[in-house]
Each structure stands twice: as C-alpha cells, then as structure tokens.
Image: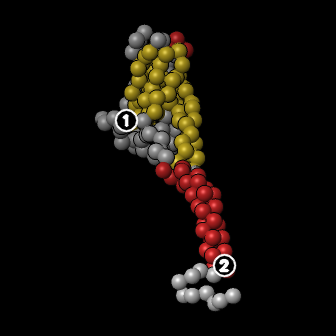
C-alpha cells in the first residue's frame, strides 16, 4: 500500500467530512423550523387598537336611564397576553339616538358611578360630578367623560374602541 498523495483524501478525512455534512444538514432541518417557531409571535402583526364591540340589543337600554355595560378585551402581543377591563354607560336619548360614555373620570382615572337620585355621574376621587351626557359640572375634572363612537346595525348597538376625548 502506498502513502496517499497530497491531492488524495484519506478515508478518515472523507468520513469526517461526510459526517459533518450530514450532521449539519440534520441540524439545519431541525433547527431552522424550531427557530422560526420560537420567533413567529414577534413577526405576527399586533392587534389593532381599533376594535368593534357589540353591546347587545338596543331594546336592552331604556330611554333616558344610563345603563352600565362591562367587558374585558384580551390582546396578544408576541408572548404577552394583556386583559383590559372596560366599563361604560349607555344613554339612550330616543328610539334611534344613543350615546356611550366611558366610566373613567377625566381627572385621575377613577371609575365614575351613576347616582339616579341626583342625576349625576360621581367620581369618588375629589368628588367630580358629570351630568347625564357626561359633561363635567363640578369638581376638578378638566373635561367631559370620553365617548365611544356607536352605530346601530339590525337592532344591535355597536361601539368602536378606543373612546375619543371630548373637549368642553
């Protein structure tokens, strides 16, 4: 047996190269999909800020009486899941006119509640008062309650998130 020349590959070197190539191919076939799976939440488009929420049948809301409605919205952003609770008051002014107000005081973000005896929404933080249509009437709140854009479809009331900020 003669010694291998410089241009010839030894059996040992061929086996090493073949095993390295096969191992690299197997690693790529398993590794690339695994990395794609782990990173896929990052590449997905996040939930839009605007969302449509069905508030149920319009007949559920009596005319002239603010009616409370609560719901929770869950958003997924990558690996993070966030739940946000919303509270709102539906004020039906007539058969076809409806306004929906946030229950968050515009002063410090406390939850307002409707008091039928004095016909005001009252914030427990610094005693802010709002009238039936959410206009600030006393206390430190700087502006009216935020309002949701609404529409009526097939007898159902639909609100669009987020609420818009009203001025004076």
Nearer the N terminus, badge 1 or badge 2?
A: 2
Q: Which of the two discs, 1 and 2, sits closer to the camera?
A: 2
Say which element carries label 2: helix
Report x, y in % for residue 161.
Answer: 44, 33
Residue 148 lies in what quarter of the image?
A: top left
Residue that lies at the very extreme toward the right in this rendered image = 1
Say which element carries label 1: strand
Distance from the alpha carbon under mark 1 to that under mark 2: 76 Å
Residue that lies at the very extreme toward the bottom in this rendered image = 3
Q: Nearer the viewer, residue 128 or 102?
A: 102
Report x, y in % for residue 124.
Answer: 53, 40
Residue depicted at 37% across the width and 35% down the height:
164
Query: From the image, which quarter does the N terminus lie in?
Result: bottom right
**Disc marking residue 164:** 1
Q: Nearer the viewer, residue 68 or 64?
A: 68
Residue depicted at 52% across the width and 11% down the height:
59
Left/right placement of residue 90 relative to residue 16 reads: left
Report x, y in % for residue 90.
Answer: 48, 23
Query: From the image, which quarter does the C terminus lie in?
Result: top left
Near mark 2 (Cα within 10 A), the count class, few <14, some 14-19 or many ≥20, is few
Residue depicted at 60% across the width and 68% down the height:
21
Which residue in the structure is indicated by mark 2? 11
């Amino acid at each position: 047996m003669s010694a291998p020349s410089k241009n010839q590959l030894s059996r040992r070197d061929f086996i090493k190269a073949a095993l390295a190539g096969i191992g690299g191919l197997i690693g790529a076939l398993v590794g690339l999909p695994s990395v794609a799976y782990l990173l896929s939440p990052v590449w997905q488009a996040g939930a839009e800020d605007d969302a449509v929420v069905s508030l149920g049948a319009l007949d559920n809301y009596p005319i002239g009486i603010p009616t409370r409605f609560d719901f929770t919205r869950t958003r997924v952003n990558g690996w993070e899941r966030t739940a946000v609770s919303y509270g709102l008051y539906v004020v039906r002014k007539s058969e076809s006119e409806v306004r929906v107000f946030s229950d968050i005081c515009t002063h410090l973000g406390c939850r307002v509640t409707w008091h039928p005896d004095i016909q005001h929404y009252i914030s427990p933080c610094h005693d802010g008062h709002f009238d039936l249509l959410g206009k600030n009437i006393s206390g430190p709140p700087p502006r009216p309650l935020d309002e949701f854009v609404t529409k009526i479809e097939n007898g159902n009331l639909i609100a669009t998130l987020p609420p818009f900020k009203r001025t004076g």
